[in-house]
Amino acid sequence: MNMSLVGNSVTEGEEFMANGVPNVSIIVPLFNDAQWVGQAIESCLAQTSQDFEVICVDDASTDATAAIVQRFTEKSPRVRLIEQGVNQSAFQARKVGIAAASGEYVLFLDGDDELAPTAVETSFSAATLNDADIVGFGIDVLTDGQKVTPRFERSLQPPRAPLHGEAILSTIMEPEKPAQGHLWRYLWRTDLLRAAYAETPPDAQFWRANDLPITFLGLAAANKYVGIGDRLYRYNFRRGTSGQLVSGMDKVAFFLSAIDSLDSISEAVKLRASLPGGTSTVEVVYDSARRSIVGNILRTIRESTVPDLREPSLDLLRARVADDIQLLKACASFYPRMLSSVSTLLSADPLEARHVQNVLITTGNLRAGGVQGVVVAQARLLAKAGYRVTLAVFDNAKSVYALPDEVEIIHVHGDDVERISHWAELIRERAIDMVVDHHILYNRRWPYLVLTARALGVPTIGWLHNFALRPVADMNDGTSFLLQNLPLLFQTVVLSNTDVAFWKSQGVANVTYLPNPASLVDLRAAGEPKTLEGERIEIAWWGRLQQSTKQVRDLIEIAAELQALSVDFHMRIIGPDSADISADDLRALARKHGVRNSVTLVGPCQGDALEREIARAHVFISTSVIEGYPLTLVEAQAHGLPVVMYELPWLAAAVGNHGIVSVPQGDKRQVASAIARMASDPQAYSALSGESLAAAERALGHDFTDLYRKLFANELPAQYSPEPTTEDLALIVRLAVAFSERNARAMQRHEARTARQMKEHSVAAKELSKANREARAARRRADAITSGASFRIGRAITFLPRVVHRALRR
């Protein structure tokens, strides 16, 4: 190693340097810091304690840095200069400084920063008082001399509670938090860092995140840490390399080199974890720190890199990380805003066709619901056909469905990083060939799992269980999210040809229509049409009680309309509560409309209990404003029930279905009138029942196993993925307008209600203000009375007889 040491003689008043060993060595690694190094050294020499030395290691600067430091060495024997003949990075410069240090403890100072005057005295006092290996202290973040970036500044402040053993590393470098590896945030026991450097490659040179490996190993080896609130370091943000724009591939390579610095200690970390008494904590923290570095590079690519370099930068990062799943984890935990770009990168390579034997089906939960019923039916069909089926859910609530013994239910839990790990483990352990995701409409985390499967060569099919305009109806940005991410899927399955037309018109090519299997086990169309001869008509509705899409409040108003028409009826509403409405809410509404005795809220029903409820009914009604493929229609019609429903013109189950009577959306009176006509015309009722049976037979006649086999092999006939027609697009536009206007009316009602409430509050506030003014006026009048001469004379007159009486008694 080519380096030289520059020193000088002792001057008067600085006998310490000649007669003793300093308590603290301040190590200053330098490279082309001529603009600021003078201020840095001045801040050292201004310390309130005299018990320190300053070791400046110049890493072959090409400017006047070394000359400036040399002038300081001539003025003060506390300052030493070590010059390296060739540039070897700050990592090596600090190593040289630590090797030359005389103090029991070391502080670090970058050449463009400064120490507070009490840095040495305060930090060393805390170390000796607590016998600590490490002392953390506060940081001031400065830009052009002004305190800025409060969030970043807060992240640099130290933990205050004392820490011991492995808690030091896991607290200061808390997993899933950005890894802060700055050595200058702490006072260190010198021997601790010498031992840390001994665990690294002897000639390692790192230009980015170059202090992180030593910080990590030092924290991992320490026995005791204490933190103090005093702000002892002044960090000048945007000096040096911090906050600079990345405008060339050389700078890209510089930022990517941060990964190398942490990779250099991977073997040391494994060894430390394997030693007697070692735990996995150090590996967990290391894994998080590495992902943090990758996440920070993703941020730099997106926020600080010129646009033309972003794509090649991402390509280089992928190659450097060398593990697509690790890249995904870094994106998920530290910079999810980069998911779109990462998705584009990881999905660029086509997947090879594969024979499908092991299928992983996933959904949110297995509580009662339409989607859950489809999932269970699909699992049964595939298992019966000889596929090995695993069912993964994200909510471990108990299943209400019976599944074949060979279908195993797995609970996937945790945050995105944990889910990615679990997903990869499931796919590897069970040799999964195809993933079928039924939950993509109901969360925005699924792209991580699709990309995880893709990284392992496994395609994913996504099922959209509602009409394409559902996000429009819900007034959210779900359509944009889906348009961005559906191309990641092997296939997107939708529930009508109108859905196919919508997504294809928006550029999603891999979309196909498939009907859903019935959730009731072995559902078949009943033999004979139902009859209705002079008996009370039984009306049924079943599903999850929900107002936003199923509009179940309308059921009660339909009952009121039937009562007004003098129809002899009874309505049974079957299903569990939801977040926006409950059975008790509907009971209260029924009482309000005077139909409480004509409406029964049954509660949740499954299996045989639901079969019995359906069998006792004559008519099924549906008040939904939007649906995908409502299996309740198939279930009702398979039992011979005519259906009266609000029109859903895209619905595949309604095409050519003469057992359905459709009325305009929201027209409760027409629903009641249609039921009244059935009640008064038994022959027409039986004809509708027969049409329902015929429609159910068609819906249940699909060979679902064969459809799934062809779906997996990408061999479905073209009829399942038709090209959009002008009629399709006209319908989509008409429906989009209808949903938008419906939402506009809802917003107007909300605004009117808010305005009324504000007016009421304003009136109340004015009345309260008036009452307060009157109270203050009354108080002033009372004060005037009690302080006036008349009041005082009156009190004296009143008091005088009592005084005389007491005097006479004495």
Image (tube, grey):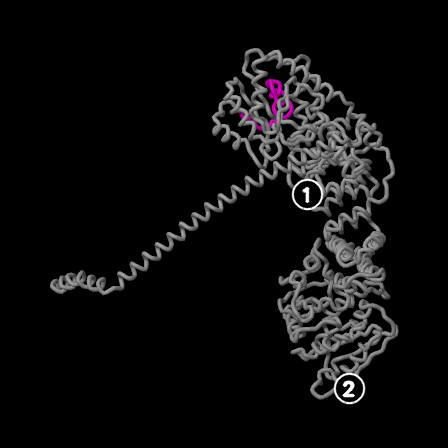
Residue 467 place in picture, x, y as percent: 69, 33
x 70%, y 25%: residue: 653
- For residue 9, say whether it is visible: yes
Q: Is residue 278 visible?
A: no
Q: Quadrant of residue 273?
A: bottom right
Of residue 158 and residue 531, the one placed in the foreground of this image is 531
The magenta segment is: 600-622
What residue is pinned by disc 2? 9
* Residue 587 coordinates in the image, percent (x, y): 51, 29
Q: Earlier in the sequence, mark 1 or mark 2?
A: 2
Question: Which of these two is toward me, 537 or 443?
Answer: 537
The residue at 25%/64% (across/down) is: 788
Q: Amino acid at mark 2?
A: Ser
Instruction: Give the image location of residue 428, x and y in percent.
Output: 81, 40
**In front here: 278 or 198?**
198
Q: Is residue 605 magenta?
A: yes
Task: Characterize the local packing of mark 2: few (<14), some (14-19) or many (20 or more) Cα atoms within 10 angstroms.
Answer: few
Q: Which residue is mark 1?
A: 477
